[in-house]
Image (cartoon, rainbow, N blue to C red):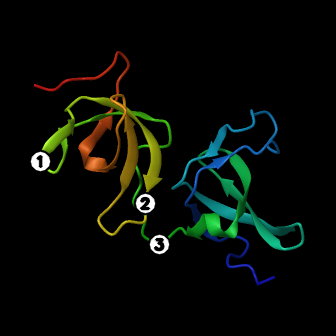
Amino acid sequence: MSLPRFDYGAQVRLIRNVRNDGTYPGMETGALLIRRGAVGCVYDVGTYLQDQLIYRVHFLDAGRTVGCREEELIPAAEPWIANLYEFRDPVQASRALAIGGEVVVSKGQAGSIEKVLRDLPHGIEYHVYFDNGRTLQVPEHSLAPLLSGGPQHGH
């Protein structure tokens, strides 16, 4: 096992959403504990199954201390671009989307986020399942939140 990358007191940023795996008391299994992008302070470093480093990280803004694997953390000072949407968030196309010049999703068409693609050189994109049955890879700037009441058509 390698030495810990982060020491006690290190400021770290979470790069993946952390959900309750059943070990966090008082919340349902699967509930979102800490959203990616949150910054916390390493409180302790331990091991799990004798070969995985687990960092106890205190996230002051959320008032929670959560166990994080090393690959889920980066130094807080590293550059970070926050994403606007998460898995299953309802969205709508903020413009018409076309493939080969043919519009396949109209402006205002409703959809939901299937996957967040963060590590692209030109910014954050999403796999979006639209209610017309199409799944497209869409840049963040081509989406808007879907407000309750269905698609919002712009004028």
Q: CA distance from mark 1 to mark 3?
A: 39 Å
What's the residue type where badge 1 is placed?
A: Gly
What's the residue type where badge 2 is placed?
A: Arg
Which residue ends up furthest to the top in the rendered image? 149
Residue 123: percent from the left, percent from the top? 32, 61
User: Which of pointers 1 and 2 lies earlier in the amino acid sequence?
Assistant: 1
Disc number for residue 118: 2
Say whether marks 1 and 2 touch (CB < 8 Å): no
Q: Residue at x 63, y 51 (%)?
A: 60
Q: Residues within 10 Å of mark 2 (few under 14, many from 20)?
A: some
Which image quarter holds the N terminus? Answer: bottom right
Front in this rendered view, residue 28 or 58: 28
Q: Please tell me in which quadrant of the rendered image residue 14 appears.
A: bottom right
User: Which of pointers 3 and 2 lies earlier in the amino acid sequence?
Assistant: 3
What's the residue type where badge 3 is placed?
A: Glu
Q: Is residue 149 left or right of residue 113?
A: left
Q: Residue at x 69, y 55 (%)?
A: 58
Residue 10 visible to the viewer: yes
Give the residue at mark 3: 78
Residue 33: percent from the left, percent from the top? 66, 43
Give the residue at mark 1: 101
Q: Is residue 150 left or right of residue 1?
A: left
Front in this rendered view, residue 70 or 58: 70
Q: Please tell me in which quadrant of the rendered image residue 31 appears.
A: top right
Q: CA distance from mark 3 to mark 2?
A: 15 Å
